Amino acid sequence: MKKFVTKTERKRSTIDMRKILAFIGIACLLFFSCSKKEQGKEHMISGFQDIEVDIKGDSMIYGLICDGTTDSVIVLWPFSGDPVTYDCIDAHDNHRIFGKPTIGDWVGIMRDSTDTTVVTMAIDLDQLKGTWTYPVIPVMKDLQHMSPRMQKRMMADMPDSIRNTYLVPREYGFTLKRAHQAQSVGFVYSNSTLESDSPVEYPPVKRYRQWHMLNGRLILVSAEAVKTSEAETQAKQVVVLDTLDFVYMDIDSLIMTQNGKRIGFHRKENALKANDAANKAQAKIDSIKKQER
């Protein structure tokens, strides 16, 4: 039986629909407003303008891993052209395959200079993306002016109560995203007064903005505030390129060298959780400082 709708019911239905549309409109406005506030907050914290760096001279070939790839051959479908099969036996034996290339993954390869059918290095860039961190231990402020040997001795003689209170490790590192975007890990927001009273000091956190590959190396692009003279009232933004070399990479571990120093990274779920853990640790230290004052 066909149901007839009265004029009153139609009017009530129209009013309800208007309420729903109004609610949706308000929700959208709130969403975009919050989004803009968050973007403004991040920009205010960073204090830097956007960075755009063009890396030139890269000889890597990029493409997608195809079916048929094994420990001895890599079948790569470049972004232009047909799939190509490369010999990767030497790269595999020399531990120069970083990650575990899987069908469909975005990979970069380096070819032999004398035989372009041979791969000397392969990096699974899809597996490289994500958040990588390493632990950083603070140093006592007074120890910075001592020799490394004396620093170790002083640290060894330090009472456990002080060591456990102040020598709290933090996670430093970076998040590599799509479109070559990068984000720093390690920022902690603490009371400036309490921070100045702390007997320990952490190294500064790099402000990463981009990442690129260059001939099998990872290039991290950051910005630093630099004053060229004491007369300047405002620091200038200086772009810094950090070059890291691959040593080892699997799903959860990454070892790289920078300026001859080896750094062991571990994969984290995301930068927010890594920074949140550091902020909770810092909040605990701040509460102890307040009790001591």
Image: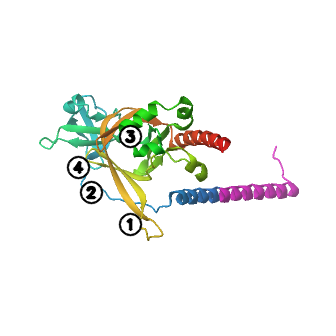
In three-dimensional space, the C-alpha distance between marks 1 and 3, rounded to whole angstroms, equals 36 Å
Of tags 1 and 3, the one toward the viewer is 1
Q: Secondary structure at mark 3?
A: helix
Q: Which residue is mark 1?
A: 228
- Mark whose residue sits in front, 2 or 1: 1
Q: Are marks 4 and 1 in contact (CB under 8 Å)?
A: no
What separation in Å lies between label 2 and label 1 (alpha carbons)?
28 Å
> Which of the pair 116/191 is nearer the observer?
191
Residue 71 falls within the magenta-colored stretch: no
Name the N-terminal-most of marks 2 and 3. 2
Which residue: 45% across, 45% down? 175
Of callouts 4 and 1, the N-terminal one: 4
- On the image, the x and y values in percent for residue 293 come to 66, 45
- Is 4 included in the stretch rendered in magenta? yes
Residue identifier under label 4: 59
Range shown magenta: 1-30
Say whether residue 104 is visible. Answer: no
Q: Position of residue 240 (x, y in %)?
A: 36, 56
Q: Amino acid at mark 1?
A: Thr
* Residue depicted at 88% across the width and 57% down the height: 8
Q: Are marks 2 and 3 in contact (CB under 8 Å)?
A: no
Q: Measuring from the top left, give residue 85's x and y in whole percent.
A: 22, 37
